[in-house]
Amino acid sequence: MKNVLLPTDFSENSWNAIKYAIDFHEETACNFFLLHVNRLSHLLLNEVPYLPTQDVVESVYTKPSKTELLKLQKRIAKQIPSSSKHRFYTIADHNFLVQSVRDHVEKKNIELIVLGTKGASGLKKAIVGSNTGDIITKVACTTLIVPENATYKKIRELAFPTDFALQYNLNTLEPILKVIQKNDAALRVVHISKKAAELNSDQIKNKELLEDYFQAHAHSFHFLTNKNIEAAVQCFVDSRDVDMITMVAKNLNYFQQILFHSKVEEISYHINIPFLVLHN
């Protein structure tokens, strides 16, 4: 059974991510863990000069969270076609968010975290320190970001923007391979640079590793030159009808360039295309 963690704040964005996660794993045997975290920072009330007791936390925070999680579980049962391959569990926790997610990833042997985001500005804020960004950068687990307008469809084309600067661990690339195998999808490796330049020896080696690893599956390499990397990704996504984008979180500088843009209205992939984040 695959173990999938679904953090939720009970918003429609997190509901959309939950629905996408279930549809994405329609044919996969999964344990889905619905997690709601009352963050410790929210428990330190200005009016109260001390930490609430365990009884207060239980009655004021944990019990209402458990009630909302049960409502969410019922909504899933009512609105999403059931599968005998899927099991759902609820977790109400009070902790610092990243620590809670990290703890449950370890305890439940989580293979994938699925998170919802709202709009291009939501993704931009995510990288500079909001909940999603903290989980992406601080929890060493494959994470699928589902924007507010993303609806599940079979993955036909998976775009992998890279500067070939990282030496990839084969375990890091395995989630990409699984998506390709499951959907009979094609991988499109996209090298985008701000100015035309030959690959150096390390970049060539890293490119060759990707070629070897994905040789048995449909794949291609594309080289684009554009001072605006995000605009180049948008152009590529539009031209190829890309269904998912994947990147490695460790390559944070390049990672941020893909997600940042001063004119967010020109960039639609932020709100339409799921983003699979890998950890090296």
Image (tube, rainbow, N blue to C red):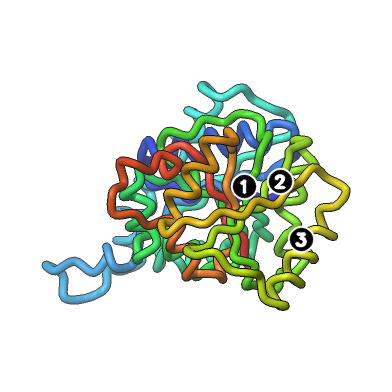
Q: Which residue is drawn at 34% across and 50% down?
A: 122
Residue type at mark 3 is Leu
Query: Is residue 92 found left or right of 23 in the rendered image?
Result: left
Q: Are marks 1 and 3 in contact (CB under 8 Å)?
A: no
Mark closer to the chain start, 3 or 2: 2
Q: Position of residue 96 (x, y in %)?
A: 40, 68
Q: Could you say which is closer to the camera, residue 165 or residue 33?
A: 165
| Gap in angstroms between the C-alphas marked 3 and 2 | 10 Å
Query: Residue at label 3?
Result: 210
First in sequence, mark 2 or 1: give its number: 1
Could you say whether the residue bearing mark 2 is in a helix, strand or loop? strand
Please state if 106 lies on the left or on the right of 96 as rendered: right
Foreground pick, 85 / 151: 151
| Residue that badge 1 annotates | 159
- Mark 2 residue type: Leu
Instruction: List x then y, in percent, for residue 138.
Output: 50, 70
> Could you tell me residue 178's position as x and y percent?
76, 47
In the rendered structure, which amino acid carries the disc numbered 1? Ala
Residue 201 in which image quadrant: bottom right
Does label 1 or label 3 sit earlier along the sequence? 1
- Which residue has dot 2 on it? 187
Asked if one can make out residue 67 in the rendered structure from this viewpoint, the answer is no
Q: Is residue 206 visible?
A: yes
Q: Is mark 1 on a helix, strand or loop?
A: strand
Name the residue rendered at 55%, 26% in the picture. 77
**58 up-or-down from 254: above or below:** above
Whether residue 70 is situated above or below residue 140 in the rendered picture: above
The relative height of residue 214 versus residue 26 in the rendered view (above or below) is below
The C terminus lies in quadrant: bottom right
Q: Residues within 10 Å of mark 1 (few under 14, many from 20)?
A: many
- Left or right of 141? Residue 29 is right
